[in-house]
Image (cartoon, rainbow, N blue to C red):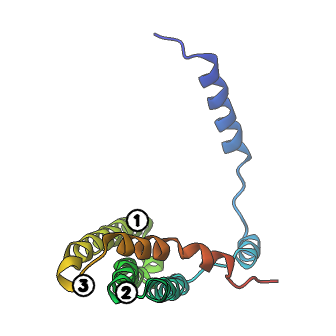
Amino acid sequence: MKKMPPAFDREEEEQDEQARNFKPLTADEARQLRERSPQISPWRVIAGQIIAGLVVALATWGLTGRQNLGWSAGYGALSVIVPAAVFARGLTGRLASLNPSTAVMAFFVWEMVKMALTVAMLFAAPRLISELSWPAMLVGLVVAMQAYWAAVVFAPRRK
């Protein structure tokens, strides 16, 4: 039988030590942890994406003077916002009532729906937006995708 290198032995010992020292939280400790780290609503994130999408579309239109660039950037943002809203609607409220393995499966199914809807919207873009500008659309898409950072930064803090 092959002997494991010493690094693996140390890592296994550390994992065993951590398992022995594991202490589940009491109900009061869990409540205090939730109060210190409140969850951010997915609808708050989507609202941030909507605001970011509107800003980038209007800014693109205003700075370039070209309406098609504004529509392209706005559609790029919508290609993130609409699938995110479908994803959030599919998951909110239901996960808490599901057992853990079903909840994980539901998450992955809705994530696949979200990705498929995003891809479908991107494929439909040339038919829906006259004189589509792919770079402007991608800017709108990226800005809306990154808007969740603003939702985290501006999330209400508990005392």
* Identity of the residue furthest to the top in this view: 1
> What residue sits 26% from the left and 78% below the top?
132
- Tell whether 19 sits left or right of 115: right
* x then y, percent, for residue 29: 76, 70
For marks 1 and 2, the one nearer the N-term is 2
- Amino acid on which disc 1 is placed: Val
> Could you tell me if the residues under marks 3 and 1 are in contact, i.e. CB atoms within 8 Å?
no
User: What SS does tag 3 mark?
Assistant: loop
Kindly identify which numbered label has been placed on residue 104: 1
- Amino acid on which disc 3 is placed: Ile
> Could you tell me if the residues under marks 1 and 2 are in contact, i.e. CB atoms within 8 Å?
no
User: What SS does tag 1 mark?
Assistant: helix
* x then y, percent, for residue 158: 77, 83
* x then y, percent, for residue 115: 31, 69
The image quarter containing residue 81 is: bottom left
Kindly identify which numbered label has been placed on residue 66: 2
Kindly identify which numbered label has been placed on residue 129: 3
Near-viewer residue (134 or 122): 134
Near-viewer residue (63 or 152): 63
Q: CA distance from mark 3 to mark 1?
A: 37 Å
Total numbered circles? 3
User: Mark 1 or mark 2, which is nearer to you?
Assistant: 2
> Is 153 placed above or below 17 here?
below
- Tell whether 39 sits left or right of 79: right
> Is 90 placed above or below 13 here?
below
Q: Residues within 10 Å of mark 3 (few under 14, many from 20)?
A: some
> What residue sits 68% from the left and 76% below the top?
153
Q: Residues within 10 Å of mark 2 (few under 14, many from 20)?
A: few
